[in-house]
Image: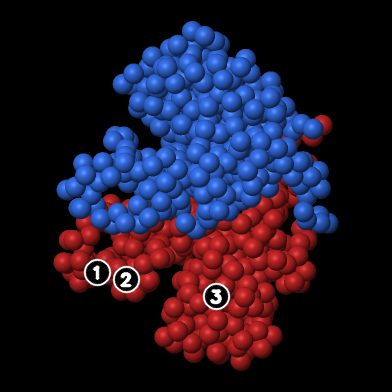
Chain colours: A blue, B red
């Protein structure tokens, strides 16, 4: 079973599905599982801790995976990126900031350069900077994103970037979403929430259960969890999570937060692992579509089977 | 040329495309043009002015159109709705609030009851209240909306409402969007921005030009224009427009706005018609996809032709 597009040809894979490089969740085991099921697994290089990244490469156990990084963080410390390029890596995803300072190093290593963008203007800049693949990410995604929505962003990016394959991200967690993305002109999808509750994910067991029971109506797009984690994210990218007791308590309390941040952050840090009413469940609006804990291979097969059926037999009568 | 779904059967139409009932823009001529091109035109009954609505019925010139109303406004004055039901109308769309008080009157008149919702929870309530069709509207839509995005909302609503046909709204302005919506499980689409620059729309000439040159990156979702227009919209629904000089001047100026609202509103009201740097161009993120002023029939044909091509020959190789 395979779905071939411009993306699968470029990356030499059988399924146009990329694992979102979720920081702290997409480790080597999950990335390897997605790659072995026909897609492209990306390790969540996140904030660029070289030791953590090294350990995840070992856990990938030789599978042909890639890695994702946060641009504005790489600008402070790019050691983890450099060691990946020296090792040799199939693909590097860069998001949240200008890719120009890193583009030539990535490409000259032989890795494919995947640029994730959140606006049409940034898509044009990524194309000019030499991206091999452009991920158009909507705000309905879990984790960090911008403010545009996937459905109108994808065709606008497709129209703007010529022959560069475009991948749709944000709000896609099943085969209906994959089939829809292909209709929009995308050459594939990137999924995070769909894999968050998988067996191989590094998310806490309680986080996986919370993701499955969570509702898209209950997600929030907020800077709160970055503030209390001491992460200095630029204001144009906030983080979507399920709401919980902690987020509800501090919603619309900007002044109190600013005045008492250190004690609120200390309270946050004191939460037990798996206390999902304090720490966030980092999934997006596609939470409604998550139904069970299972292996990444089962999730991949489910997405592909549904998409193949829809593409083979469109759900409308043409006359 | 026709695309048949559960929606086209229910409404006895040839194209699964509904005109969004844009207040002040979707008058009788535009609604009639969409109906005559095979879809369902809805007059924008908006704030419920009976004389305006009466005039638009005359301009529809006998075409089989429907009408849309704002629930929280109907709760204050439902004369326009009642006169439409007495006249006999094909379909009534109700949005932004509880449909229960009006559902039985609409249905017993013989009109189809189309409920537009912005959350999964409201979709379930609309199903329980007897809606014949449910429009799942994402925040990327122009005009008023909630905060969920179309791509993940539509399949979640489809899964939740049993056999009731679901229509996708928000971010759809071409045949790629229609084909994608059908893959998500929708039985059709509702489009506003796509028709905003059409010849038959009541939008000002300058507003039509502004919509076409506008960018999805430049839309804002804000309560500003409702405040200065004196419209007391509940806070859960704000309005998406292109940004302009007026909106940029008052962005993040909540305190100044509250203190000087009457003078700011007077300045707003003093703007010349067609001064698009003061009054809003009310289109959504799909603005990127608007390319030309043309007739509604040409827009309908363009959407259908593209969607038929995509559905007939999916853009991926299945093996």
Q: Which residue is mark 3?
A: B94
Residue B229 image label: 2
Quarter containing the C terminus of chain A: bottom right
Left or right of B176 in this view: B140: left
Above or below residue A311? Residue B75 is below
Element on which disc 2 rests: helix
Q: Residue furthest top?
A: A86
| Chain label for disc 1 | B
Image coords of residue B214 (percent x, y): 44, 49
Left or right of B307 in this view: A121: left
Quarter containing the N terminus of chain A: top right
The residue sitting at 34% across, 63% down in the picture is B223
Residue A195 image label: none
Determine which quarter of the picture holds residue B166.
bottom right
Would you call the spot at circle 3 few (<14 residues within 10 Å), some (14-19), or many (20 or more)? many
Image coords of residue A123 (percent x, y): 48, 33
């Amino acid at each position: 079973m395979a779905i071939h597009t411009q993306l699968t040809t470029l990356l030499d894979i059988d399924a146009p599905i990329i694992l979102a490089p979720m920081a702290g969740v997409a480790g080597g085991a999950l990335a390897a599982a997605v790659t072995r099921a026909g897609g492209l697994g990306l390790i969540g290089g996140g904030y660029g801790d070289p030791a953590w990244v090294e350990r995840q490469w070992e856990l990938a156990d030789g599978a042909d995976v890639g890695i994702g990084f946060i641009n504005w963080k790489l600008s402070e410390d790019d050691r983890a990126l450099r060691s990946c390029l020296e090792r040799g890596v199939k693909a590097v995803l860069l998001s949240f900031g200008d890719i120009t300072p890193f583009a030539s190093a990535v490409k000259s290593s032989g890795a494919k350069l995947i640029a994730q963008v959140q606006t049409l203007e940034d898509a044009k800049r990524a194309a000019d900077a030499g991206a091999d693949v452009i991920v158009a990410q909507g705000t309905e995604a879990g984790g960090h994103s911008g403010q545009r929505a996937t459905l109108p962003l994808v065709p606008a990016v497709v129209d703007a970037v010529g022959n560069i394959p475009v991948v749709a991200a944000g709000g896609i967690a099943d085969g209906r979403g994959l089939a829809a993305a292909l209709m929009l002109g995308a050459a594939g999808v990137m999924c995070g929430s769909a894999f968050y509750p998988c067996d191989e994910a590094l998310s806490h067991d309680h986080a996986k259960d919370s993701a499955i029971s969570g509702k898209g109506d209950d997600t929030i797009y907020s800077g709160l969890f970055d503030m209390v984690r001491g992460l200095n994210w630029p204001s144009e990218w906030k983080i979507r999570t399920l709401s919980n007791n902690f987020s509800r308590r501090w919603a619309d309390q900007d002044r109190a937060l600013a005045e008492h941040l250190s004690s609120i952050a200390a309270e946050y840090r004191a939460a037990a692992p798996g206390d999902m009413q304090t720490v966030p469940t980092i999934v997006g609006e596609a939470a409604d579509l998550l139904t069970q804990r299972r292996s990444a291979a089962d999730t991949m097969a489910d997405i592909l089977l549904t998409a193949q059926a829809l593409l083979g037999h469109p759900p409308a009568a043409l006359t």
